[in-house]
Image (cartoon, grey):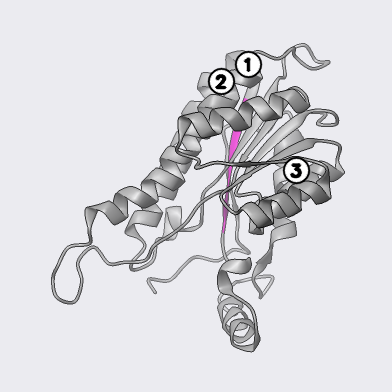
Amino acid sequence: MDIAGASAIVTGGASGLGEATARLLAQRGSKVVVLDLQDEKGEKVAGEIGGAYVKADVADEEQVRAAVETASELGPLRILVNSAGLGRAGRIIGRDLAPIPLEQFEFVLRVNLVGTYNCARLAASAMAATEPLADGTSRGAILNTASAAAFDGQIGQTPYSASKGGVVGMTLPMARDLARHGIRVNTIAPGLIDTPIYGSGEQAEAFKAKLGESVVYPNRLGRAEEFASMALEVLTNDYMNGETIRLDGAIRMPPR
């Protein structure tokens, strides 16, 4: 799929995996809408790549619809990358035997799963209304972000693993739903990736180095640019559809 001249929406595009992907898409000729809640960072990234920043909660219908409209003004919307997400660790019951607050579980699912679905359905509607590309059928591609935790959830990751497992689970049926419109859907499930979530400084670097020891090969954390490279291939390869790809250096997460 030729993405030059098309518009793209990258959720969580102000930092980490989203930022790296937004920058690479822009380098390849796409007009990128950076969708995020971090105003300063989002505006900076959008300005540097010649795109647009839209502040939006991924689970808010009207805010995401505004981002879709902005993208459609920049060019035919062909790409959605769902990389916004979060995790809040907590065992299902605590040391005092009190259950985890239900709101904590619901919040993680709202952002990671409901938000992914919300952005996908609204972007797909706009993609389906575009003229097909030169092959006469292709109109766009959606890329979701899951996690190795969807398969190897660790202690305290029940909400996060459930949300990412849901993303994996809806990938194939979503691809089947949208096939008639020439829209492909795939998911990348990254492992341990070096993003700002780990902080910075000497202690952070030591912690990341220790984490990297658990990766089979390469024996380090992944880089956001490696995620972006895989994202670009999945988005542009017309025969890649309905698949979840682990990008994790062959790691299988231990219980803790």
On screen, 106 above or below 223?
above
Q: Is residue 206 above or below residue 134?
A: below
Q: Is label 1 in a helix, a strand or a loop?
A: helix
Point out which mark residue 178 bears: 2
Callout 1 touching callout 2 (CB < 8 Å): yes
Is 247 a magenta residue?
Answer: no
Q: What distance separates the C-alpha of mark 1 from that of mark 3?
A: 21 Å
Mark nearer the N terminus (2 vs 3): 2
* Image coords of residue 130 (percent x, y): 70, 14
Q: Earlier in the sequence, mark 1 or mark 3?
A: 1
Amino acid marked by disc 2: Leu
In terms of secondary structure, where does tag 2 sit? helix
Check disc 3 and report the residue beneath it. 232
Q: Quadrant of the C terminus?
A: bottom left
Question: Which residues make up the magenta segment?
Answer: 184-190
Instruction: Provide the residue designation for mark 1.
Output: 128
Secondary structure that dominates the magenta span: strand
Q: Are marks 1 and 3 in contact (CB under 8 Å)?
A: no
